[in-house]
Image (tube, rainbow, N blue to C red):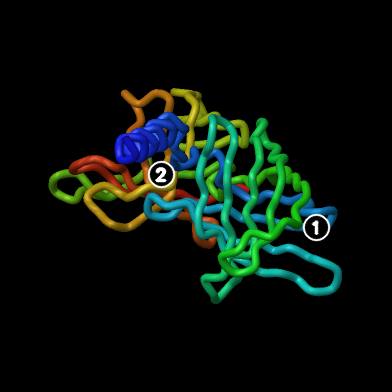
């Protein structure tokens, strides 16, 4: 009977653990710069998405010293709740665990200090607001040329083409100053087509007319890379 009781107890523990909600990877809307306070001291967390993993850094000013840490784990718990584990920069020593509920662009919750692998009883509250960060693609751009296709053709004006990316995620396409198309867009960090290279990729609401495009901006020049077979790489310059 004693063995039966032990087995029954183990099964009960397993059943409880299976019924508990399991942590999952957070959504990409957590990515960005969050500023606020931990225990009334100013802090900033920058969260990034790189090769399918959430990464980031923490700066926390406690009196005169500034604590620098990096994110070791980020998990979503129970819907909009999130758990962030932080380790001291240059080490594997956990210093903080942050738990919070995300509401729009606000994180509010509690934190626990750590001494190595030991969670200390000292804890408190923290909150942060997401800073608006406009992507470099925002603005108006004039088409210079496109290269690609099956034979590597080079296309240049005419027609005169102008594109605009607005801060409120609206994309507009003009030919000879006439509006031809307007749709929404989102930017997602992901691998480029048939490549291990990660890039910011624009996805358009009107996906039948506009294919996803990887992009980067340098010296007021916008480079767009169509994410499809035998498509084009295009070059635009910023309109001031």
In the rendered structure, the answer to whether residue 229 lies left or right of residue 209 reads left
State the residue at coordinates (24%, 40%): 228
Q: Along the line of sight, which residue is nearer the eye, 66 or 122?
A: 122
Cα distance, mark 2 to mark 1? 33 Å
Of tags 2 and 1, the one toward the viewer is 1
Q: Along the line of sight, which residue is nearer the eye, 84 or 138?
A: 84
Say above or below: 43 vs 160: below
Q: Which residue is mark 1?
A: 42
Which image quadrant for residue 102? top right
Number of numbered discs on residues: 2
Q: Which residue is mark 2?
A: 201
State the residue at coordinates (62%, 54%): 97
Instruction: Return the x and y of residue 238 as percentages of the image width and height.
Output: 55, 49
In the rendered structure, the answer to whether residue 88 lies left or right of residue 53 reads right
State the residue at coordinates (36%, 35%): 5
Disc 2, SS: strand
Q: First in sequence: mark 2 or mark 1?
A: 1
């Amino acid at each position: 009977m004693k063995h039966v009781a032990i087995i029954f107890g183990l099964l009960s523990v397993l059943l409880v653990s299976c019924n508990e909600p399991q942590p999952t990877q957070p959504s990409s809307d957590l990515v960005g710069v969050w500023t606020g306070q931990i225990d009334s001291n100013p802090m900033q967390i920058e969260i990034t998405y790189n090769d399918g993993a959430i990464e980031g850094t923490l700066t926390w000013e406690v009196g005169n010293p500034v604590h620098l840490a990096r994110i070791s784990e980020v998990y979503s718990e129970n819907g909009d709740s999130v758990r962030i584990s932080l380790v001291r920069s240059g080490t594997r020593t956990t210093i903080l665990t942050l738990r919070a509920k995300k509401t729009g662009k606000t994180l509010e919750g509690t934190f626990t200090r750590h001494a190595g692998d030991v969670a200390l009883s000292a804890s408190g509250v923290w909150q942060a607001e997401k800073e608006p960060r406009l992507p470099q693609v925002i603005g108006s751009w004039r088409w210079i040329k496109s290269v690609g296709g099956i034979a590597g053709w080079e296309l240049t004006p005419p027609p005169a083409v102008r594109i605009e990316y607005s801060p409120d995620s609206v994309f507009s396409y003009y030919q000879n100053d006439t509006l031809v198309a307007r749709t929404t867009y989102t930017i997602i960090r992901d691998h480029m087509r048939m490549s291990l290279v990660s890039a910011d990729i624009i996805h358009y609401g009107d996906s039948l007319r506009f294919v996803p495009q990887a992009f980067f901006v340098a010296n007021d020049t916008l480079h767009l890379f169509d994410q499809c077979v035998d498509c084009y790489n295009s070059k635009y310059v910023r309109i001031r």
